[in-house]
Image (spheres, rainbow, N blue to C red):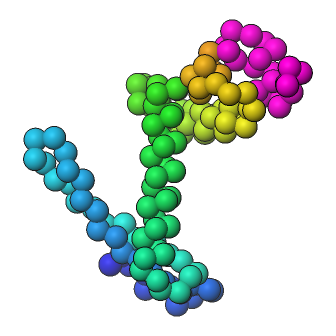
Amino acid sequence: MSDWVSGAAKWPGLQTVIEVERERHLPGKKVETGIQYYISSLSVDAQRVARGIRRYWEVENKAHWVLDVAFKEDDSRIRKGDGAENVAIIRRFCLNLARLDPRKNSMRGKLKQAGWSDTRRAEILFGQDNNI
């Protein structure tokens, strides 16, 4: 276990420290393993904790998939300085704004419309939709 856990007694409200060992099966029979730690103010309930961790990663994986498909995030070649982190923040901000848009359309469709039309872009950015 990591050294940071030794200071856990000083953390107010800390109830549990959870260690999760993950296996990822890749093509070619390659297996990657990793250990992740979680902290919680909830009491120990293994099933509840497992559900919470799975839900978190489900949301995270869905967000990554949308960012890759709609924003081509994995194709980005921004590497210099804080550029990659800054652009990632902007992408997530735009993703959240587009998700708040009430019109029924795919994420890619909303982004294309925003790129084509100043009016549509303003509707997504500022939450103004005169057609609904």
Among the 4 quarters of the image, the one containing residue 74: top left
Residue 125 image offset from top left, x and y in percent: 77, 28
Name the side, left or right, on which 37 lies relative to 88. Answer: left
Residue at the extreme left of the image, as rendered: 29
User: What count of labels does the image hold?
Assistant: 0
Asked if 42 appears above or below 35 in the picture, the reply is below
Asked if 22 appears above or below 14 in the picture, the reply is above
- At x 77%, y 17%, the residue is 120
Q: Quick check: is 123 in the magenta stretch?
A: yes
Q: Which residues are magenta?
A: 113-132
Residue at the extreme right of the image, as rendered: 130
Of the 4 image quadrants, the one containing the C terminus is top right
Asked if 44 appears above or below 70 in the picture, the reply is below
Name the side, left or right, on which 35 lies relative to 28. Answer: right
Residue 117 image offset from top left, x and y in percent: 74, 10
- At x 60%, y 19%, the residue is 109
Q: Quick check: is 31 in the magenta stretch?
A: no
Residue at the extreme top of the image, as rendered: 116
Looking at this view, is 48 or 36 the one in front?
48
Asked if 87 appears above or below 109 in the picture, the reply is below
Among the 4 quarters of the image, the one containing residue 95: top right
- At x 16%, y 53%, the residue is 31
Residue 20 image offset from top left, x and y in percent: 34, 70
Name the side, left or right, on which 98 lies relative to 7. Answer: right
- At x 46%, y 31%, the residue is 68
Of the 4 image quadrants, the one containing the N terminus is bottom left
Residue 90 image offset from top left, x and y in percent: 63, 34
Which secondary structure dominates the residues rendered in magenta?
Answer: helix
Residue 7 in sight here: no
Residue 6 in sight here: yes
